């Protein structure tokens, strides 16, 4: 459907919103001051292969309407940190009468819920002496944005063949076949999601926008001789299927994963004595650290009722103070749709609350100067800066878009490694370098680096004391070549970060109990085949 063609779904939503706005009031009870209808048309596809065979394929299509009704006023209303509202399944066709009926039932429920929530909230607020630090909601100018509908564009047959081949490479490729018996798990998958979102509200905003995301994953695993579970799992994500890696790149990465799994099996366990000292994080690992320790704390979530905090998280009292070293600046720029030729899943033009976006400098030369905000303001930040974003079927919350970490003193990869080696020589001991992380920021590929530059892969390590203090005062340098990390769920986000050199991170041996090895060998390659 072309952008200038009247959309029957939007028309039906506007008509029902106008009807409800004029009629939705019970005798003696308050009329809503704000209402919003959001319809989400979700389409998903997934295919999974294990050990060289397709083991699952599914495709789903669903429409959901979410109705938000706010009682009260912008200062104090019926909303809570959960984001109250009402959900209803919507018809998959474009029948306006059926859609209006779904909106009507959801609106009735949302209004009754809002009345109850507002009464409970008024009673709860009377228990506190201090008034809330910010209003509950902020006005916004009406916006009209009608974008072309997103479609799921994926060559399913070609990708099924790719993942089937990738999941069975351990048995067939000459580079890795010699240790196929040590591979206990081998899977590959391709998944896609397309969301078309229709929004109308009593501000006068009318939106039809959406996003698409595609993701492929390769995962292989096994055990070391002492029973330690080991795995290598990674993939590529993009806003278009064409942005994913090619068949040749997927094949090559699968081989690389298998070879690194073999290396991990043969690697020594990290030293039993705890280490405190320099650790060089690759761009891949640094992006994980930024996503876990930094990004959630600049997403300004409403503080708990009765508190005087500005927001939630580790940075609630860090405004205008250093949270990173002075050589780092962080900007969230959702308008950045591509980076070095790569499509960015976190990009968008208008957020899910109808607020246009612009670059937001969150950290300037190390100091926190702004938060990412939706239409629920926090102390000292009364307006949205276009970061009200919603997972399908959920209320909008403050969420990042495209986070870019930049250094004013970027070093090349060679310079970063030279700086690490200089520290090793100065301290007269081995140091560490991590390429990839997993789970709770635990190292997947960790190398012990001698003062002479020799790198030795080790396994069984965990990091300790890797926290916001490490980011604030423990960083020595940042690289110049950024890494692009993409996340599709719960909302699409992109983080672009350079490698980082930490001065003092604790590396410890994990205390997990090792599991027993399989009692007998796997099926021989070719068993059951003629």
Image (cartoon, rainbow, N blue to C red):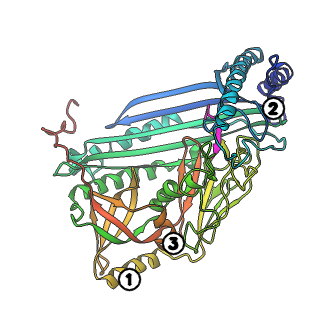
Q: Secondary structure at mark 1?
A: helix
Residue 309 percent across, percent down from the top left: 61, 52
Q: Is residue 305 visible?
A: yes
Q: Which residue is mark 2?
A: 33
Which residues make up the magenta segment?
391-398
Quarter location, residue 405: bottom right
Alpha carbons under labels 2 and 1: distance apart? 63 Å
Please name the residue shown 84% across and 44% down the image: 141
Pointers 3 and 1 in contact (C-beta within 8 Å): no
Q: Which residue is mark 3?
A: 479
Q: Which mark is residue 337?
A: none
The earlier-in-sequence mark between 3 and 2 is 2
Alpha carbons under labels 3 and 2: distance apart? 50 Å
Q: Is residue 67 visible?
A: no
Front residue of 168 and 30:
30
Please name the residue shown 32% across and 78% down the image: 453
Front residue of 246 and 87:
87
Residue 420 percent across, percent down from the top left: 39, 77
Residue 81 percent across, percent down from the top left: 62, 39
Front residue of 119 and 197:
119
């Amino acid at each position: 459907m072309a952008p200038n063609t009247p959309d029957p779904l939007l028309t039906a939503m506007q008509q029902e919103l106008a009807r409800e706005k004029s009629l939705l009031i019970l005798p003696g009870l308050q009329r809503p001051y704000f209402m919003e209808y959001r319809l989400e048309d979700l389409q998903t596809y997934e295919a999974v292969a294990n050990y060289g065979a397709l083991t699952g394929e599914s495709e789903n299509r669903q429409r959901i309407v979410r109705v938000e009704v706010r009682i009260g006023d912008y200062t104090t209303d019926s909303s809570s940190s959960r984001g109250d509202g009402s959900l209803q399944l919507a018809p998959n066709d474009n029948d306006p009468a059926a859609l209006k009926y779904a909106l009507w039932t959801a609106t009735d429920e949302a209004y009754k819920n809002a009345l109850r929530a507002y009464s409970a909230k008024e009673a709860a607020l009377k228990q506190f002496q201090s008034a809330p630090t910010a209003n509950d909601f902020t006005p916004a100018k009406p916006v009209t944005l009608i974008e072309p509908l997103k479609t799921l564009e994926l060559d399913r047959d070609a990708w099924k063949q790719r993942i089937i081949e990738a999941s069975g490479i351990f048995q067939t490729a000459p580079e890795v076949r010699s240790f196929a018996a040590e591979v206990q798990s081998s899977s590959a998958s391709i998944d896609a999601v397309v969301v078309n979102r229709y929004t109308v509200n009593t501000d006068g905003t009318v939106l039809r926008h959406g996003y698409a995301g595609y993701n492929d994953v390769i995962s292989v695993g096994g055990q070391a001789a002492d029973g330690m579970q080991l795995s290598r799992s990674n993939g590529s994500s993009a806003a278009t299927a064409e942005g994913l890696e090619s068949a040749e790149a997927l094949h090559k990465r699968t081989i690389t994963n298998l070879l690194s799994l073999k290396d991990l099996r043969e690697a020594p366990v990290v030293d039993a004595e705890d280490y405190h000292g320099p650790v060089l994080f690759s761009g891949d690992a640094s992006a994980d650290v930024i996503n876990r320790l930094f990004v959630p704390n600049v997403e300004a979530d409403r503080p708990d009722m009765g508190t005087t905090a500005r927001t939630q998280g580790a940075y609630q009292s860090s405004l205008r103070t250093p949270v990173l070293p002075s050589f780092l600046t962080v900007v969230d720029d959702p308008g950045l749709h591509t980076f070095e030729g790569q499509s960015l899943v976190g990009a968008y033009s208008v957020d899910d609350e109808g607020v246009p976006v612009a670059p937001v400098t969150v950290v300037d030369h190390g100091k926190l100067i702004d938060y990412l905000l939706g239409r629920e303001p926090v102390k000292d930040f009364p307006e949205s800066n276009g970061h009200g974003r919603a997972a399908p079927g959920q209320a909008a919350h403050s969420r990042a878009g495209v986070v870019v970490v930049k250094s004013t003193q970027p070093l090349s990869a060679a310079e970063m490694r030279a700086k690490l080696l200089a520290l090793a020589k100065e301290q007269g001991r081995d140091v560490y370098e991590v390429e990839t992380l997993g789970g709770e920021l635990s190292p997947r590929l960790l190398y012990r680096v001698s003062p002479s530059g020799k790198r030795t892969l080790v396994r069984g390590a965990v990091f300790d004391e890797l926290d916001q203090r490490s980011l604030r005062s423990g960083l020595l340098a940042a690289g110049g070549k950024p890494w692009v990390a993409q996340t599709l769920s719960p909302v699409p986000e992109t983080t672009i970060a350079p490698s980082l050199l930490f001065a003092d991170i604790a590396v410890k041996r994990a205390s997990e109990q090792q599991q027993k090895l399989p009692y007998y060998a796997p099926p021989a390659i070719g068993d059951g085949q003629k």
